Amino acid sequence: AGRSRSPRGRSNWISKAIVAFGRYPDRRPAGLDVDATGSFKLSSLMASWGHKQGLIESEVLNAVQANLFSDSQTGALRFSITTDAAGGVIIRVNQRQGKAAAAQRPGSRWSGFGSGSGPGLAAAVHPGFGATG
């Protein structure tokens, strides 16, 4: 209930649900096998969730394709779609871009967080922390 019935609203709803399944283990439907990269088979998604929602494979794929990019300016991908050796469709939910991703980029204002090098969190929160002189 409460879901938009418009095609665009339905596409967004499907996309958001799939992102949650790929990123958050506690949000996954029983039976959906997601690997460490956030990848899972479309057939597994349909069996564990999609069919119960009244969805068909093409509708799920269209929603993923319509919401492929998380940021149209940078071209950051929210999803990747590939096939396995048997020809089955694999959906990969990429990790969220933002502060967590920025922590991995040199020169980022977040680069000291959790890296084990430099002054770390205390200096980031309190710029004068650890300064001498």
Image: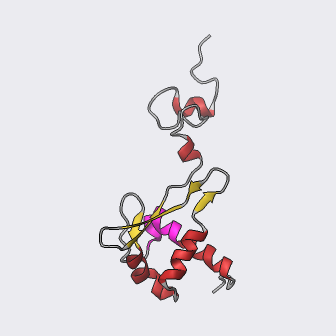
Q: Which residue is drawn at 59% across and 48% down?
A: 98
Q: Where 2 sits versus 19, above or below?
A: below
Report if residue 16 is visible in the image: no
Which quarter of the figure has residue 129? top right
Q: Which residue is drawn at 30% across and 68% down?
A: 85
Which residue is farthest left? 86
Q: In this view of the protein, which residue sits in the foreground, 114 or 107?
A: 107
Residue 22 counted in the magenta span: yes
Q: Where 124 sits versus 72, above or below?
A: above
Q: Where 131 sits versus 27, above or below?
A: above
Q: In this view of the protein, which residue sits in the foreground, 73 or 14?
A: 73
Residue 57 counted in the magenta span: no
8 with respect to 92 (left or right): right
Q: In this view of the protein, which residue sits in the foreground, 111 or 133?
A: 111
Which quarter of the figure has residue 106? top right
Which quarter of the figure has residue 125? top right
56 with respect to 89 (left or right): right
Which residue is farthest top? 133
Location of residue 65 in the rendering, given as x and y in whole percent from the top left corner = 56, 69
Report if residue 42 is visible in the image: yes
The magenta span reads 18-28
Location of residue 92 in the rendering, given as x and y in whole percent from the top left corner = 45, 63
108 with respect to 88 (left or right): right
Q: Residue at x 39, y 79 (%)?
A: 43
Location of residue 133 in the rendering, given as x and y in whole percent from the top left corner = 62, 10
Quadrant of the drawing holding the N terminus:
bottom right
Location of residue 78 in the rendering, given as x and y in whole percent from the top left corner = 55, 60
Q: Main secondary structure of the magenta part?
A: helix
Q: Residue at x 47, y 70 (%)?
A: 27
